[in-house]
Amino acid sequence: MARSPRAVDVPLVLDDSPAPLRHRVADAVVGALRTGRLRPGDTLPSTRSLAAALGVSRGPVVAAYDELAAAGFLRSRAGSGAVVAPGADTAARAGAATHVPETGRVRPPSPEPVPAAPRLDLRPGRPDTSLLDRAAWRRAWRAVGDALPGNDAGEVPRHTHLRRVLADHLRRGRGVVVDPDDLFVVPGVGASLRALPEAFGLVGASVALEDPGYVEAWTAFAAEGVRTHPVPVDADGLDPALLPDGARAVYVTPSHQYPLGARMPVTRRVALLEWARDTGGLVLEDDYDGEFRYDVSPLPALRSLPGAEDHVVYVGTASKLLAPSLRVAWVAAPAHLRDALRVTLESRGLVVNEATGLALAELVTSGALAAHHARASRTYAARRGALVTAVAEHLPGATLEGVDAGLHVVLRLPDDVDDHEVADRCHAAGVAVSPLSAYAVRTSVRGLVLCYAGLPETAADDAVRRLARALAP
Amino acid sequence: MARSPRAVDVPLVLDDSPAPLRHRVADAVVGALRTGRLRPGDTLPSTRSLAAALGVSRGPVVAAYDELAAAGFLRSRAGSGAVVAPGADTAARAGAATHVPETGRVRPPSPEPVPAAPRLDLRPGRPDTSLLDRAAWRRAWRAVGDALPGNDAGEVPRHTHLRRVLADHLRRGRGVVVDPDDLFVVPGVGASLRALPEAFGLVGASVALEDPGYVEAWTAFAAEGVRTHPVPVDADGLDPALLPDGARAVYVTPSHQYPLGARMPVTRRVALLEWARDTGGLVLEDDYDGEFRYDVSPLPALRSLPGAEDHVVYVGTASKLLAPSLRVAWVAAPAHLRDALRVTLESRGLVVNEATGLALAELVTSGALAAHHARASRTYAARRGALVTAVAEHLPGATLEGVDAGLHVVLRLPDDVDDHEVADRCHAAGVAVSPLSAYAVRTSVRGLVLCYAGLPETAADDAVRRLARALAP
């Protein structure tokens, strides 16, 4: 991501104020100056990279940079990006802003029409939680209400029962054999990835990541001082032969490459494991939606290969399987890294509370999770089928990738198309989608990422008609 | 804490294996070497400091250091602490250990009698969760089960309703007026303190802390690169006149100094606020058990003073009020620091999931929290009374401190007593207590910290008789 040695990779998060997007982007930069995460002389990411990282279109980011330059926070140097101006941090701390902040909750009448929220949301990461068996969900939380809560402030919840049943679930569903003692219940994948560099001694080390890939992983590792190296992916996912010399770890999504959707063939899996054995490197396997596959033979997790247990850190999540709002994921660590991971997770507060662990354990033990998975798989398969059919009809000649597994597909676009602009047009046409280039670091890819998990079969035709209109030249 | 420039402040956490404590301490050091958090040439903390930080007695730590030195991981230099030996990191990574690790779950028959778990646990941080109204607790989680969980993986739970009702609760109970937009729901105090230095630009800056004080705060700030400065406390808590020059922030527990129990008088509160105004410093107010007070007039939070809203970061928790296992706390930030705090909390995953937020909101809205607080206050007042009476009877001449508020008292011991040893004797006599010196950094204090929250009135006499026996010379 960072091309010059002084370019910075500050995680900027937009606030949820009703202010215009360009103001919120500018505010985020000023906020980073105020807290010292950005300093004079730092080079900001390109507008394209920042837009991608924030998941917004590029226009407001360009406007925000203009606003920041006009207010004296940035100096734009042609050809080398925007540089933070001397004194910008002091100005920010003194309360300077690029615009008059909105006070109170009364908003002035806006002359511009606010674009309507899209009718259909196809952005990835959104399973259909309405498919849950409401009775089973109720029973799970009733179990929490029936238990007297623990009273020891010094105690970290051990989730002994949950780890045992999760280990069994992983063995049956993903072929992963793990000692419950090596399994950690963590509050979601994105944030927990931040603990891995410290726990595994990767701070300052080189770690390879898929390009295009999971932006949150890039951000998490960069924030922890990891030197990130993009490795391009092809139709078979990441090619181990392309791993850079000196890489100490590699982050991969072999079950359904994020976002392109490739399933890594077993030859590459074995080669990746050989790389780990030969170099002592660590494979970080993110199995984010590995539970869902269609019309293809099961391909167990990379971690299930013989000998993988010493070299592969397996990460799974309840986000797709149940609901992202649970914020529960799990990490299976090699036994020799277990203690280090525990220390880091606990000291960073990356633990799941007792109540959430109890509810999840109840869902697994009662069989509700397995039943939900079977039911949701059938529904998602039908929705995927309806989307694929509609694309074939309304977008003849279009190529869909990643259809074999997971909950989303990728519609490729020609290299000269601005897919952020296309995504904006789709949004205006009532369908929210993610531009593929938002996931790219160095590779040039264009397309739309379409998650069908929440798209009813009856709505697929309407959705793709709208996409086709937005894509029409 | 660090006295020489090379001394390190590595947060070591013990695993929960059944191995002897000295092995677990040694394992924690070897684990830190393995992950690079400790390096050759680093000076380890003194055995006393480490024992204090881990909340264990000093004997096992001394034994662990001996074990580590014998195995070649440490070189002990007389008078200057133990230094990590060259090559120790490589040895650790190669799997070297100081002892034969226990394999499997079968433990060899032990010739030594295992000390029985104490009958009565008076260590602080343990409210009596059995006082909860079980019906209200069930209703709270039923509300979670009745709601369809959110499905957006990219969305951080906003807890809009909870923040509104919490703001109202803080206004009524603690006099704290806060805009719900400036209130953050976080997963517990200890870990969330780690986010404050980055959010508030305190990394590398000087922050003053109470001595004796909350060890987790020291550890959290040190882990984030803060230069921590101990300030001794007296019967009125921290004296603002003793704040070191150049301090950019101060961490205080004005409602019930942790652990000594002083209530900071209003003159010092105003002086602290003046210090903040004059120097631009930040006051971090931890109101960890401010809801409980007895026979004394209410003293609202420091944050409730006029003008404090721009200078005081208020931290409260549900740990004492409800249950520590909920892992829910809240932070009220000055408005100009709100965005910075949000960015840091979110990027570190320090957020509470939707379900936990819903349950807590239900407990506040239904009035169950207020009813529980009233009921628990009466019970705790009676338990406090019984303990104070029993101490007067069986330990004549003993001084108890911190009796006006909170859930624990301090029994002072003479300066020449080893209170870790006394605590071990109490433990052997069936009563678990915490040695006061475990909370000290530079000051020399000796005593026992006794939490009466879980001590029934009928058991107070027995508990204090046991303490008296352990204290007898």
Image: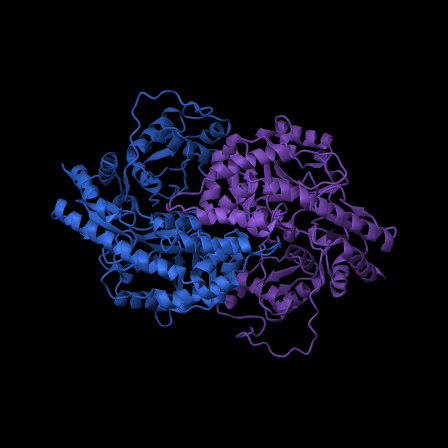
Chain colours: A blue, B purple
Q: Quadrant of residue A269?
A: bottom left
Q: Quadrant of residue A310?
A: bottom left
Residue A146 at what x, y percent from top left?
55, 55
**Quadrant (top left/top right/bottom left/bottom right) for the C terminus of chain A:** top left
**Quadrant (top left/top right/bottom left/bottom right) for the N terminus of chain A:** top left
Q: Is residue A244 visible?
A: no
Looking at the picture, tell me which residue is in the foreground, A229 or A356.
A356
Residue B407 at what x, y percent from top left?
70, 47
Residue B208 at what x, y percent from top left?
64, 40
Looking at the picture, tell me which residue is in the foreground, B372 or A278.
B372
Looking at the picture, tell me which residue is in the foreground, A112 or B195.
A112
Residue A290 lies, with reference to residue A70, above or below; the image says below
Q: Residue at x 46, y 69 (%)?
A: A179
Residue B416 in the figure: left or right of residue B146? right
Residue B241 lies, with reference to residue B445, above or below; the image says above
Q: Quadrant of residue A62?
A: top left
How many labels were placed on the picture? 0
Residue B406 at what x, y percent from top left?
70, 44
Q: Residue at x 54, y 36 (%)?
A: B165
Q: Is residue B283 visible?
A: yes
